[in-house]
Amino acid sequence: MFVTSAFAQESAPAADTSHAATEGDTHSGTSVPAEAHGTFPPFDPATFPSQLLWLAITFGLFYLFLKRVVMPRVGGIIDVRNDRITQDLDQAAKLKGEADAAVAAYEQELAEAKTKANAIGQQANDAAKAEAETARKKVEAALDQKLGEAEARISSIKANAMKEVGSIAEDTASAIVEALVGGKASKAEIAAAVKSVAR
Amino acid sequence: MAADKVDPIHQFHINKLIPIEIGGYDLSFTNSALFMVATVVVAAAFLFLTTSSRSLVPGRLQSVSEMAYEFVGNMLRDAAGTQGMKFFPFVFSLFMFVLVANLLGLFPYFFTITSHIIVTFGLAALVIGTVVVYGFMKHGFGFLKLFVPHGVPVFLLPLVVLIEVISFVSRPVSLSVRLFANMLAGHITLKVFSGFVVSLSALGAVGVAGSVLPLAMAVALTALELLVAFLQAYVFAVLTCMYLNDALHPGH
């Protein structure tokens, strides 16, 4: 449609006006200068070669400029930043590893100190125990000795007493016999009787 | 003159600034060409100057450049894989060019180069041309496998191939018309609502009171157009990535 109107501009004014009338209808007759010009400007093929040429020139230069200058630069900035970020992350990871190692070393030392402390405590405990044991043994030995002495004394006293028990019994027996029987029993008989009873 | 002010088409007019004619073709330096130059200069200067300090910790503007770079890079890598990264400069240039052209067009009295179908079509043709040339260079006639999807019954194959061919051929058209129509429609709507403000204000006190509504609309539309400017640049770049993926891996 716009092709015919282009010819119309040059050759046929009648066609021109009819086209302009349809154009005018679409914007309610306010666009008198547009009608005078002939065609709706975006569809005017007379402007096509110039627009295409300048589009090619400007867009071509723009493309070359972006490709050669801008994009390497922006890409470079972004790459450098990404490199820097990975580098920083690596550094952080390394530092974290070091911190972890320090913590592990600290904990190991702590554990060693604990076992050492335990050993020392144990040793002290053992020494104290051994000392107490020897002291106890000494005391026990002394007590045993005293016990032995006491027992010996008791047994000697007992033996003495027992010895006297015989004569007392004989005396008592002879007295009892005398009182009961009224005769005198021989000393030997009474001794034999007491002995047999005592057994 | 009042009619001239509210003319929503006036903003799309091409004016010759430096007339040049070579071999019967009119190759004049027009306002369109001026804004192409402006787009390129603004985009290139922004990317160049914001990254000139090469800071390890980017400032605001540098991070804008870096975000744009990584945004397009991720988009391309997601759509076309690591092999697609050889087209990164191309897609990045397209994205920045369309984005800055759209954004510049939002300024009052500025010309919107993406509101001209020939400009968007030129960019779309460049994309499809790259796809076709690279596809044939890399895969030879294997590139034609693009039109023959796997696992289609033989009796359906002619129909499916026909549909695939039509869809491929319509790609440059849809790619260019989408961007062009969005920018054109947005700017016309904006102009129409702004025109209402002017014409209503001329009607006296009641008109001034009434012009608040279209003024609010114009403000809201400007915000919408800002979104559309970004979105259309994004859509253009995403579709470019997907088409390039077809050139790299035509077997679906």
Image (tube, coloured by chain):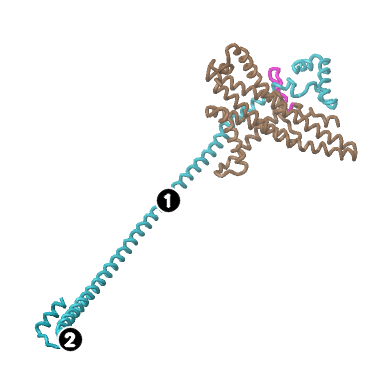
Chain colours: A cyan, B brown
Residue placed under numbered mark 2 in the picture = A180
Q: Which chain does the numbered disc 1 sit on?
A: A
**Residue A108: image tag:** none
Q: Which chain does the numbered disc 2 sit on?
A: A
- x and y percent of residue A121 in the render? 33, 64
Earlier sequence position, callout 2 versus callout 1: 1
- x and y percent of residue A92 in the render? 47, 47
Q: Is residue A128 above or below residue A168?
A: above
Q: Is residue A198 above or below residue B65?
A: below
Residue B1 visible somewhere in the drawing? no
**Residue A100: image tag:** 1
Q: Tell if the residue under mark 2 belongs to the same chain as the one under mark 1.
A: yes
Residue closest to the eye, B243 or A198: A198
- x and y percent of residue A167 in the render? 14, 85
Distance between the alpha carbons at the discs numbered 2 and 1 = 110 Å
**In this rendering, would A27 be left or right of B140?**
right
Give the residues in magenta. Answer: B16-27
